[in-house]
Amino acid sequence: MRFNIFSLSHGWRGFLLEIAIVVIGVLIALWTGQLAETWNWRHKVDVAEGQLQRESAPNFFVSAEQVVVAPCVDAQLAALQTRLLASGDVLDPAPLYKYDLFRYVYRAPSRSYPSVAWHAINGDGTAAHLDNRRHDQYAEAYTYVAVLEQMARESDNVLGRLTVLGAAIPLDASTRAGLLGDIEEQRSRNGLQSIVALQLMGTLRDLGVAPPTEEVVDGLEKNSGTTQFCREHQLPVADWRTALAALPSA
């Protein structure tokens, strides 16, 4: 029955013309479908780029904060180390600071690095349709994000353990060595966090998704409790703009 669609009543020329019309119709349908699919992916990529840019702004800010306060955090940890070494059988307790329900013997950032948008566009396949260079740069950026998120959790854990330095605890050799190990671990991690944070900032800059400089400066002034703490206690801070300018573009 399907072959009856084509008729030889008008001769072979008419028969071939009918076939050509059908073939052209099929090709047009396929081309239209491909065009619609291409447009659909382009639209998804545009939406994804907007989501990634919005997610990049807080990641850039948190990274800038880490770079700024790294010397301050290191100075606080060095002071705790000196206090611990100078104490006798009982620890000379460090000043204990309070913020809301938190207590701490040194101030450091405690923030998260968002990555919801990146995971979402990888999950629905949109990431594969990004420009190859931008895809690779975003993949690099979110590798840094994952590393920083992990180090931030580890840092928070040690910060909590070191709160004991605010009490006059007995110090035997084992306790002293353990606390000194925690402090040294934290100092090393703090330095590494600063390096990775700067690399993340450089990648976001190269992608063109870094927030305006004035927004970052204003955010650090108004929303970074650690930066304010460091300045109030006259502890050293770094200039993230200088550090970023010294980082070569990819």
Image (cartoon, helix red, strand yellow):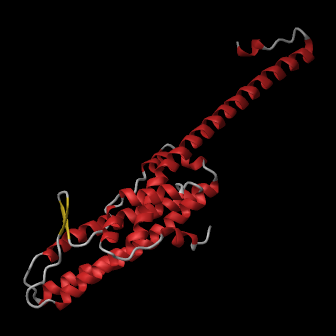
**Which quadrant of the figure contains the N terminus?**
top right
Tell me which residue sits at (65%, 31%) in the image.
36
Q: Residue at x 47, y 71 (%)?
A: 239
Q: Is residue 166 above or below residue 124?
A: below
**Residue 126, picture quadrant:** top right
Q: x%, y% of residue 152?
A: 33, 65
Closer to us: 89 or 176: 89
Can the viewer see residue 45?
A: yes
Residue at horizontal 88%, vertical 8%? 9
- Residue 245, position as x, y percentages in the image: 57, 70
Is 69 in front, or is 194?
69
The residue under the point 37% across, 62% down is 149
Residue 221 versus residue 34: which sits nearer the camera? 221
Question: In screen coordinates, is 160 left or right of 231?
Answer: left
Based on the displayed image, in which of its 4 quarters is residue 159 positioned?
bottom left
Q: Is residue 91 shown left or right of residue 226?
A: left
